[in-house]
Image (cartoon, rainbow, N blue to C red):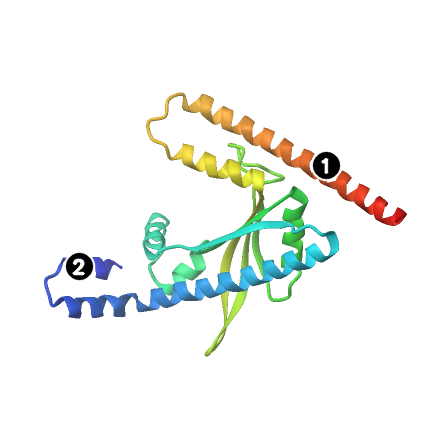
Amino acid sequence: LIEINKLAKEEMNPELKMKIVKDIAKPYTALLTYYECAIDEVETKLNILNKEYSLNTEQNPIDSIKSRVKSIESIVEKAYRKNIPFTIDAIEKNIRDIAGVRVICNFPEDVYKIKDGLLLQDDITLIEEKDYIKNPKPNGYRSLHLIIQTPIFLSTGKRLMTVEIQIRTIAQNCWAALEHQLRYKKNINEKKSISLALKLLAEESAGIDIKMEMLKKRIYKDNILTDKKN
């Protein structure tokens, strides 16, 4: 992309310039396509798990799935910031969140149910796990982060791709989305008191998760007992 930026400042035939830009960017465009394919693989696995679990419990553990692939601009910015050479090999090895999947679950136990079901699959390799639910960040952030490898199958053969998966509850996701907006708001007064308030809200949100899960267990327990009587 350094070459592309230099090229953009030069005066030449627009069609020729576009062709050169495409040729330079082609390997990186292909790489992003491979990451999109990896996301497709992971989403398929998650959707299958969601359907399977609903057969046994009549309740889907997954509320929604969101995904994204980092833009080339974001990759370049992170590579510069972390002093990573801008080569295909270096990017794949050192930037592990290019492909991101966020799984929103209904209850805390669903988070671990989905994690366990996913990691049991023999073509999924766990690279790293960070559990910010059991060990929240200092600001109150809660989520389960997994870095995994999954294969995609191309015409030239199998290729292993790295994907970051974040699994969290609806309540955790709501808090994280609002905290993200407030964190990037400029010219905030009383930052310390606001940070403390956000942390307290995160704890209240976690309390709601626990109470809702307990209520769910009561409801399903009552349903099971009713079914047995009938």
Which amino acid type is marked by label 2? Ala
Which amino acid type is marked by label 1? Leu
Please identify the residue farthest to the front as the structure is shown.
230
Q: Nearer the viewer, residue 99 or 78?
A: 99
SS at circle 2: helix
Q: Which residue is mark 1?
A: 215
Q: In percent of the image, x 41 and y 65: which residue is there?
A: 33
Q: Does 50 sit left or right of 178 as displayed? A: right
In the rendering, at what x and y percent does residue 150 appear?
Answer: 54, 64
Q: In percent of the image, x 11 and y 66: which residue is there?
A: 12
In the rendering, at what x and y percent does residue 145 appear?
Answer: 55, 48
Q: Nearer the viewer, residue 112 or 205?
A: 205
Image vertical order of residue 69 relative to residue 213, above or below: below
Q: Quadrant of the N terminus?
A: bottom left
Label 2 crowding class (10 Å Cα cut-off): few <14, some 14-19, many 20+? some
The circle drawn on residue 8 is: 2
- Work out how far the residue at label 1 is from the one at label 2, CA to CA, in angstroms: 60 Å
Q: Nearer the viewer, residue 128 or 43?
A: 43
The circle drawn on residue 135 is: none
Image vertical order of residue 214 relative to residue 158, above or below: above
In the rendering, at what x and y percent does residue 68 appear?
Answer: 44, 54
Q: In percent of the image, x 80 and y 45: which residue is there?
A: 223
SS at circle 1: helix
Please identify the residue farthest to the bottom as the structure is shown.
156
Q: In percent of the image, x 60 and y 29: which residue is there?
A: 204
